[in-house]
Amino acid sequence: MIITALYAALLTILLVVLSFRVIGHRRAQRVEIGDGNDRELMRRMRVHANFVEYTPYALILMGLAESLGAPALLVHALGASLLVGRILHAYALSQTPHILQVRVFGMVMTLTVLMAAAATCLVLALLSGRLI
């Protein structure tokens, strides 16, 4: 799963950046637990949480598709779309006020990757002839 590993590594870098944004704001505002009713901290936490909620599923599905023999170009398309979608979503939601159109586009890209990867896994699993 070399291709999936590439995108997992790139997405992990983005996760760490988002984590440091939360940590940095927590330290600056001296908020140890929760959000301290700080709207900016809430925003940063949601950007991070949204990333964590969607990215693992997409990577798992990509890895499964790759292991089932999906074409490399398809796996790259899924990975690149996921990376761009997550960057756009994080960027748009991190702005004050957030950029709704870019946020929605990033989310649409992410959901499209999830559905395309799931469909790829379903088709390849059914075509494998090894389900029973």
Image (tube, rainbow, N blue to C red):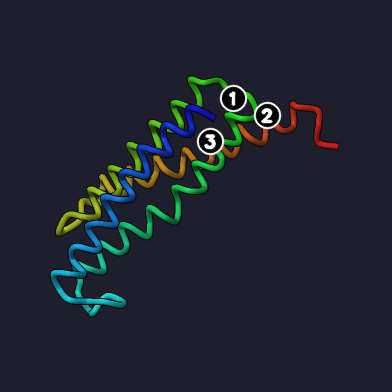
Residue 70's tag is 1
Three-letter code for the amino acid on which mark 2 is drawn: Leu
Q: Are marks 3 and 2 in contact (CB under 8 Å)?
A: no
Dividing the image into 4 quarters, which one contains the C terminus? top right
Residue at the spot of label 2: 124
Most foreground residue, 38 or 1:
1
Mark 2 surroundings within 10 Å by alpha-carbon count, few (fewer than 14), some (14 through 19), many (20 or more): some
Q: What is the x, y in percent for residue 77?
A: 44, 27
Element under disc 2: helix
Mark 3 surroundings within 10 Å by alpha-carbon count, few (fewer than 14), some (14 through 19), many (20 or more): many
Up-down relation of residue 91 to residue 27 (above or below): above
Q: Quadrant of residue 50?
A: bottom left
Q: Quadrant of residue 108?
A: top left
Element under disc 3: helix
Most foreground residue, 83 or 67:
67
Three-letter code for the amino acid on which mark 3 is drawn: Met
